[in-house]
Image (spheres, rainbow, N blue to C red):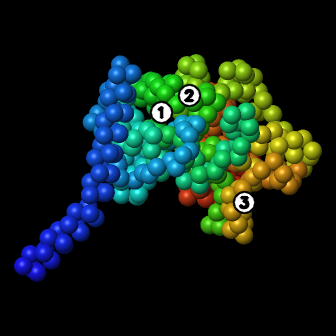
Amino acid sequence: MKLIVKKCLSVLFLLLLVAPLLYGQQSCLSDIENDFQDLKTSLKNPIFLDPAPSLNYDDREGKKVLMVVVHHTESPTLKSTKYALNSSGISVQLIVDRDGSITLMVPLEKRAWHAGISYAKVQVDNVVEELRKLNDYSIGIEIVNTGLEPFPEEQMKSVKDLILYLMKRFKIRKDMIFSHAEIGTIVYNSAIEGYAMRKPDPHKLFDWELLEKSGIGLHIGDRISPQDAEQKVNEVLYKVGDKSENILKLKKRLNGFFYKILPWNDREGNMIFPDNNANYSNEFDENFAWVINQFSMHHLPKEIRKDLPLKLEQEDILPEFLVKYRNLIFK
């Protein structure tokens, strides 16, 4: 009799342990299915593949969805992208394949893990705030692209339709659509003894112009012609090492436009968060040159962007590369 009671207690204990996990999985599947049906109902044209639920997510803990962050995968296929995300413990809510097909991985109301160390200086309810840990506030979209190729028309159309859907559902402003490169950071890389961008995605061939025409994002290409831009780009205003009050003003203006002038990690390894009271120097230093490049990858007209180096992650940059291209990419 005691043995039977003991076995029953053991089974009950296991059930108590497993029940929350089962409930969590069922809740996730229910949320995924609800989002999936709403997406299919709201967006008539894109192809929707069966959801591929990820376990790499959690609650937003009361934070409100304020923004969309777009990435490119570097993985060449949808299959390898899903494997890379799941095996590395990261996630996004949505993946868009080359043919425009869409895969839902994380419930849209939940917090996916895609932005990493991140920062944006934005207006929230008429108050300018410096937000960190942007997974709390964002929905992530991965776009299948190796980082070395154009984005197909069908793919860009699905990205556009998805973002318009998210803007409507979560009341996201048009100026709250970011590239990972913009909300990422500049870091000091001791291997090359210099600064570099931590994240370059989506790369320079991403069609920001298409999004801007649909009321998504703020693209300066609509305010300057490619001809004028080319003329301006060819005028070297500053080079690394120059110092002036105008450089200091430019730093402050870009910081006001949410770009991070100071790196997250300086030469000594200290993590630095930028703010209005930062003691910026008036020097066009190497770190600031990368900030200019971040801005250029998004806001220059695509006719000019195409001439920027394609791969700009820190592990791809050698000292010889910096010497060869310093004036080209920093001017």
Closer to viewer: mark 3 or mark 1: 3
The amino acid type, in three-letter code, at marker 3 is Ile
* Residue 282 at least partly seen: yes
Looking at the image, is mark 3 or mark 1 earlier in the sequence? 1
Asked which secondary structure carries label 2, the reply is: loop
Image position, residue 235 (x, y; %): 81, 34
Quarter holding the C terminus? top right
Looking at the image, is mark 2 or mark 1 earlier in the sequence? 1
The amino acid type, in three-letter code, at marker 1 is Pro
Image position, residue 278 (x, y; %): 82, 53
Q: Which of 18 and 255 is in front in this view?
A: 18
Identify the residue shown where x is 70% and y is 46%: 130
Identify the residue shown where x is 66% and y is 47%: 131
Q: How far apart are marks 3 and 2 (CA)?
A: 31 Å
Label disc, if present, on residue 171 of the rendered structure: 2
Asked which secondary structure carries label 3, the reply is: loop
Q: Distance between the residues labelled 2 and 1?
A: 30 Å
Residue 75 vs 228, above or below: the answer is below
